[in-house]
Image (cartoon, coloured by chain):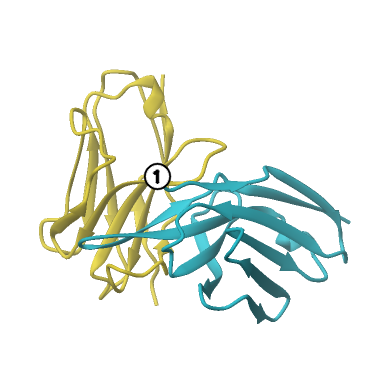
Chain colours: A cyan, B yellow
Amino acid sequence: GEDVEQSLFLSVREGDSSVINCTYTDSSSTYLYWYKQEPGAGLQLLTYIFSNMDMKQDQRLTVLLNKKDKHLSLRIADTQTGDSAIYFCAEISFYNQGGKLIFGQGTELSVKP
Amino acid sequence: EAGVAQSPRYKIIEKRQSVAFWCNPISGHATLYWYQQILGQGPKLLIQFQNNGVVDDSQLPKDRFSAERLKGVDSTLKIQPAKLEDSAVYLCASSLDVQGGKLFFGSGTQLSVL
């Protein structure tokens, strides 16, 4: 079945780069997503990548996709204290009537000043 | 543009009691989702609606959970009777279409079952 795995914690210093990794199982996923959750809030879509791409850059965010290894990563350049949050990787699983997101367990990013 | 609205924000009940959560999606969004997020885990889909029809409820514990979206707009999720393991944040989300992964989430209802 579908499964998405992430490391649970990452701690970096302000100004450093952060790299959050994710592995997924559904090779038919056409898109892969990164969501951010701040304390006490719902999830917010950060970025996504189409499965025929291997990289996507969006300002400070870089998404790398290795489809052969089913590995996805999110790099945040010049990490700020406001980036402290939980980051979820998600794959989309399709069935007859539509698609649903399968989320990983989330990586808690802590940014120290 | 108004976001996804959920209420209540917090709810504390005793086991075996009933509870209901309400969600109003973004205007024009045909697809509505209820997710359960247990502490330390990622959200798990409970039920997905397309307009007022159920698209997927394969992970909804139907012996105690029910959900409806009668007029294809707002939705309620009910638990009756609640168990200790139902303690979680219940997130509502909406999207424009049924196939996409671009979801807009509400802030959730934090449920504690004592």
Q: Residue A68: x percent and y percent?
A: 59, 63
**Which residue is located at x 73 percent, y 66 percent?**
A75
**Which residue is located at x 69 percent, y 73 percent?**
A61
* Among the 4 quarters of the image, the one containing residue A60: bottom right
* Among the 4 quarters of the image, the one containing residue A101: bottom left
The quadrant in which the N terminus of chain B is found is: bottom left
**Which residue is located at x 41 percent, y 63 percent?**
A28
Q: Secondary structure at mark 1?
A: loop
The quadrant in which the C terminus of chain B is found is: top left
Residue for badge 1: A1
Q: Residue furthest front?
A: A68
Q: Is residue B2 above or below residue B56?
A: below
Q: Residue A69: x percent and y percent?
A: 61, 58
* Among the 4 quarters of the image, the one containing residue B93: bottom left
Q: Is residue A72 above or below residue B81?
A: below
Closest to the observer: A32 or B64? Answer: A32
Disc 1 residue type (three-letter): Gly
**Which residue is located at x 73 percent, y 62 percent?**
A82
In the rendered structure, the answer to whether residue B28 lies left or right of residue A39 reads left
Closest to the observer: A47 or B108? Answer: A47
In the rendered structure, the answer to whether residue B19 lies left or right of residue A61 reads left
